[in-house]
Image (cartoon, rainbow, N blue to C red):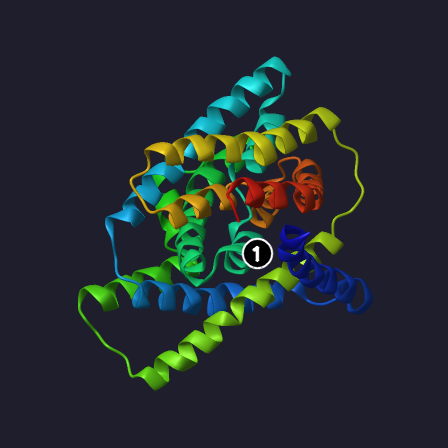
């Protein structure tokens, strides 16, 4: 019951966003833009500014790409035996590779594991944003038949506002630029507003998912790999990660999260089976009511 109470407040905020959007029809694009371009960059700046840079961040970066590569191989093999088309394969990959670390993972890490874990979760969220803006765009463009150059992929990385916040925080640390505590108090207060806002946004996005036809085998593949195989592989990888126990727990927890909302955005943008990806986002989010408490229990929370 205690573990369920960690998840329940998160889902209550999701539900508030869901109900509010059903009733009031918010302009999600504007709210998302405020979060994406103002709140999240300030949050990431504060995290990278206040926390000393260590080799652990490099390990997180390396193992994030290792896990992504392993999941990609598993998904491709799964799709091969299902005789999936190129478009189907891309849609499934968008669902299996990218966890919802921003809207969902970071608040759960905060509520379940504390402030230190929350800082690690922010770092991992930035890394996941980096991956989805490179690997994710390549996958989506492949499925749609479009082409994207390496230069365009690199450019896309630097269009991510949270990357700007992270880079600024790192530079301020490296050059020992100290800001007045009064200014940092405002920065921290503004950045902290990001978490409830992105949680509300996810609820609003779930409210916009429509009923469309899709192949149940595709959704089954996404659910199985994202919600079961991903955290299991993450748990195996941390056995050889030379980082502290809290970072290991955060790595497993965030990779047990449901499908990222950004995956749906890419599927819509490139017209790669958006119905499959959006429904997978909904169903994995609902299933996580059961799977995340189990994950927390196994982590010893």
What crowding class fits label 1: few (fewer than 14 Cα within 10 Å), some (14-19), or many (20 or more)? many
Residue sitting nearer the eye, 206 or 251: 251
In the current view of this chain or complex, which residue is farthest to the bottom?
A: 182
**Residue 146 shows up from this direction:** no
Q: Which residue is mark 1?
A: 103
Q: Give the percent coordinates (x, y) of residue 64.
A: 39, 39
- Name the secondary structure under disc 1: helix
Q: Give the percent coordinates (x, y) of residue 236.
A: 43, 30
Q: Residue at x 79, y 69 (%)?
A: 24
Left or right position of 106 against 224: left
Q: Give the percent coordinates (x, y) of residue 31.
A: 61, 68
Position of residue 282 relative to residue 119, above or below, is: above
Left or right position of 27 against 184: right
**Residue 100 shows up from this direction:** yes
Residue sitting nearer the eye, 121 or 238: 238
Left or right position of 149 against 102: left
In the current view of this chain or complex, which residue is farthest to the left?
A: 175
Q: How many marks?
A: 1
Position of residue 197 relative to residue 179, above or below, is: above
Q: Residue at x 23, y 77 (%)?
A: 178
Identify the image quadrant of residue 286: top right
Q: Give the percent coordinates (x, y) of residue 115.
A: 44, 63
Q: Residue at x 61, y 68 (%)?
A: 30
């Amino acid at each position: 019951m205690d573990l369920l109470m960690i998840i329940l407040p998160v889902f209550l905020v999701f539900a508030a966003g869901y109900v509010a959007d059903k009733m009031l029809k918010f302009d999600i694009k504007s709210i998302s833009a405020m979060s994406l371009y103002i709140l999240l960059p300030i949050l990431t700046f504060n995290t990278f500014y206040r926390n000393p840079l260590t080799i652990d961040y490099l390990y997180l970066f390396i193992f994030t790409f290792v896990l992504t590569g392993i999941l990609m191989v598993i998904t491709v093999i799964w799709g091969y035996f299902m005789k999936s088309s190129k478009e189907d394969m891309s849609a499934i990959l968008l669902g299996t590779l990218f966890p919802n670390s921003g809207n969902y993972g970071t608040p759960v890490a905060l509520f379940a594991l504390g402030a230190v874990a929350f800082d690690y979760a922010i770092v991992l969220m930035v890394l996941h944003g980096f991956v989805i803006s490179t690997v994710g765009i390549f996958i989506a463009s492949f499925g749609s038949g479009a082409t994207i150059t390496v230069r365009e992929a690199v450019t896309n990385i630097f269009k991510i506002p949270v990357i700007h916040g992270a880079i600024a925080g790192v530079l301020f640390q490296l050059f020992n630029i100290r800001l007045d505590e009064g200014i940092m108090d405002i920065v921290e207060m503004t950045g902290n507003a990001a978490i409830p806002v992105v949680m509300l946004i996810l609820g609003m996005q779930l409210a916009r998912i429509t009923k469309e036809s899709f192949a149940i085998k595709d959704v089954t593949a996404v659910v199985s790999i994202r919600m079961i195989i991903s955290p299991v592989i993450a748990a195996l990888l941390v056995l050889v990660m030379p980082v502290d126990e809290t970072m290991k727990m955060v790595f497993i927890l965030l990779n047990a999260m449901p499908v990222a909302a950004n995956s749906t955005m890419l599927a819509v943008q490139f017209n790669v089976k958006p119905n499959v990806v959006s429904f997978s986002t909904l169903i994995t989010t609902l299933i996580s009511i059961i799977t995340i408490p189990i994950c927390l229990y196994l982590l010893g929370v």
